[in-house]
Image (spheres, helix red, strand yellow):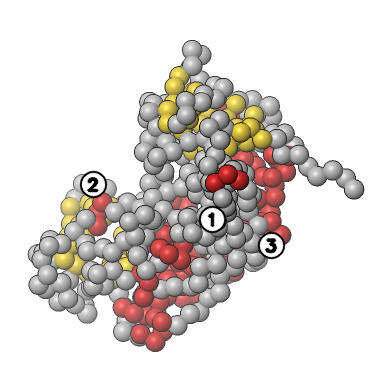
């Protein structure tokens, strides 16, 4: 199988970094991307500014591949998604040349001639990757290994508090979006300006949306939190080792203090109804109904698409759908510190020989993934595929801390060991509408 390529699924930042590492190791990559260009998912949030600096957004092996082409490393700063694509990902894809194929959708992968039940030959037979091109042509590609860097962007979580779409959610699709609105677009501004908008979610995407929407004239934002208290939802502030990430939380907190945001806690959506004037009424699991809203922005995270891996033997955590060895390190039910130690081939390996889940997809349903985490993952994975076990096991990265270490934070608890009668683990039946006031002058 040494003559066969290592197939990399996804031409995003981590997938292209994997390809650069493979080239440097003398292995042949073949990157398969469903989009029409590099960083197709990043291009969809082109208007959002990252909170990682350029120094943390360029993979070392990719930089070494690019430098002989005359590429200039971007200066320090925080790029938008669009800038990340144009100044780094597109030049990197061009440097990789024919190793990257666009408009190619991976629809399945298996061990050649064997479904997942068959034991014999799994070590000696190549993988087959089944693809469909833009014109409908079907193809099977033999591969010596598979690095899944396809991400989770195309599988957003629904509004429903139980992980399934709320009743009426699909029917209300004309007034619901699952992306941070692009307010550089006049049509999008017209959709939200002067409206009553509900934002569901507690992560950095939700904070970004809060800050953006509260800048529109006469727009009222209702922030829906499933947890029972605001707690540390605004992040670590000055204690965050990524200053831009901490600053984002502080800006969102200030917007709430200024009265632009109504915070509703303990609200787990079960239904979406239409009011008489066509607006949306959100209903919680305890039958509480919010006042009608014009639009809903759902930013409740993402989940991995495992459908095309159905014939591959995977060992995934039953909760997070992440590699089982990695899951305890990133489980938001257990911690929220963001202090996951760098990891690679050992934690990402699957029972299927030569198959690795990397990038955002390796985190399953867990949030807060950094590009440099993915770069370290694929450096280690490629070293393992090249037979360099020492390099695969070596740690070459220190991750920044978030400044937040408050225990569990994905349900109604604020601190993992908080007693039930303190209000930490059991939210009140009725959602709480909070007004965040600025501290008084001293």
Q: Residues within 10 Å of mark 1 (few under 14, many from 20)?
A: some
x then y, percent, for residue 408: 52, 54
Residue underneath mark 3: 239
| The disc label shown at residue 416, or none | 1
Drawn side of residue 62 relative to residue 116, left or right: right
Q: Residues within 10 Å of mark 3 (few under 14, many from 20)?
A: few
x then y, percent, for residue 406: 59, 57
Up/down of 11 relative to 193, above or below: below
Q: Residue at x 50, y 63 (%)?
A: 371
Depth check, front residue: 303 or 62: 303
Point out the image quarter for the N terminus: bottom left
Q: In terms of sequence position, does the residue under pointer 3 or pointer 2 come before the other?
A: 2
Up/down of 245 relative to 187, above or below: below
Q: In terms of sequence position, does the residue under pointer 1 or pointer 3 come before the other?
A: 3
x then y, percent, for residue 211: 65, 42
User: Furthest-top residue in view?
Assistant: 276
Depth check, front residue: 228 or 118: 228
x then y, percent, for residue 241: 65, 65
Rounded to the nearest whole Å, what is the CA distance between mark 1 and mark 2?
A: 52 Å
Residues at discs 1 and 2 in contact (Cβ within 8 Å): no
Residues at discs 3 and 2 in contact (Cβ within 8 Å): no
Element type where label 3 sits in the image? helix
Does residue 421 appear in the picture of this structure? yes
Element type where label 1 sits in the image? loop
Q: Residue at x 39, y 81 (%)?
A: 392
Residues at discs 1 and 3 in contact (Cβ within 8 Å): no
Mark in front: 1 vs 2: 1
Residue underneath mark 2: 135
Q: Residue at x 36, y 75 (%)?
A: 346
Drawn side of residue 7 relative to residue 265, left or right: left
């Amino acid at each position: 199988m040494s003559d066969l390529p290592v197939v990399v699924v996804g031409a995003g930042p981590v997938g292209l970094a994997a390809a650069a590492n493979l080239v440097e190791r003398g292995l042949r990559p073949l990157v398969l991307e469903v989009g029409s260009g590099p960083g197709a998912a990043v291009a969809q949030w082109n208007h959002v500014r990252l909170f990682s600096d350029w120094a943390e957004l360029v993979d070392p092996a990719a930089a070494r591949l690019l430098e002989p082409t005359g590429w200039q490393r971007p200066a320090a700063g925080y790029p938008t998604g669009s800038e990340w694509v144009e100044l780094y990902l597109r030049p990197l894809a061009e440097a990789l040349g024919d190793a990257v194929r666009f408009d190619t959708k991976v629809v399945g992968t298996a061990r050649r001639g064997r479904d997942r039940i068959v034991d014999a030959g799994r070590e000696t037979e190549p993988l087959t990757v089944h693809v469909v091109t833009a014109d409908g042509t079907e193809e099977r590609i033999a591969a010596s290994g598979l690095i899944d860097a396809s991400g989770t962007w195309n599988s957003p979580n629904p509004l429903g508090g139980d992980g399934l779409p709320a009743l009426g959610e699909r029917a209300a699709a004309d007034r619901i979006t699952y992306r941070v609105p692009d307010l550089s677009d006049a049509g999008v501004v017209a959709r939200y300006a002067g409206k009553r908008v509900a934002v569901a979610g507690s992560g950095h995407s939700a904070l970004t949306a809060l800050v953006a929407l509260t800048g529109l004239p006469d727009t009222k934002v209702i922030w829906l939190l499933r947890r029972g208290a605001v707690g540390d939802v605004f992040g670590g502030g000055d204690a965050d080792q990524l200053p831009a990430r901490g600053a984002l939380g502080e800006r969102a907190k200030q917007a709430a203090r200024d009265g632009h945001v109504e915070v509703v806690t303990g609200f787990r959506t079960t239904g979406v109804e239409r009011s008489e004037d066509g607006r949306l009424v959100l209903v919680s699991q305890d039958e509480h109904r919010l006042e009608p809203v014009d639009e809903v922005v759902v930013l409740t995270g993402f989940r991995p698409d495992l459908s095309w891996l159905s014939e591959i033997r995977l060992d995934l955590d039953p909760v997070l759908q992440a590699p089982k060895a990695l899951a305890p390190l990133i489980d938001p039910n257990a911690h929220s510190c963001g202090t996951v130690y760098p990891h690679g081939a050992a934690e990402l390996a699957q029972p299927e020989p030569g198959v690795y889940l990397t990038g955002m997809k390796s985190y399953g349903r867990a949030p807060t993934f950094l590009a440099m985490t993915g770069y370290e993952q694929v450096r280690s994975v490629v070293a393992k595929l090249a037979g360099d076990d020492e390099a695969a096991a070596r740690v070459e990265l220190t991750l920044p801390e978030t400044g937040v270490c408050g225990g569990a934070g994905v349900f109604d608890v604020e601190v993992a060991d908080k007693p039930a009668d303190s209000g930490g683990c059991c939210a009140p039946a009725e959602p709480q509408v909070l007004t965040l006031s600025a501290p008084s002058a001293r």
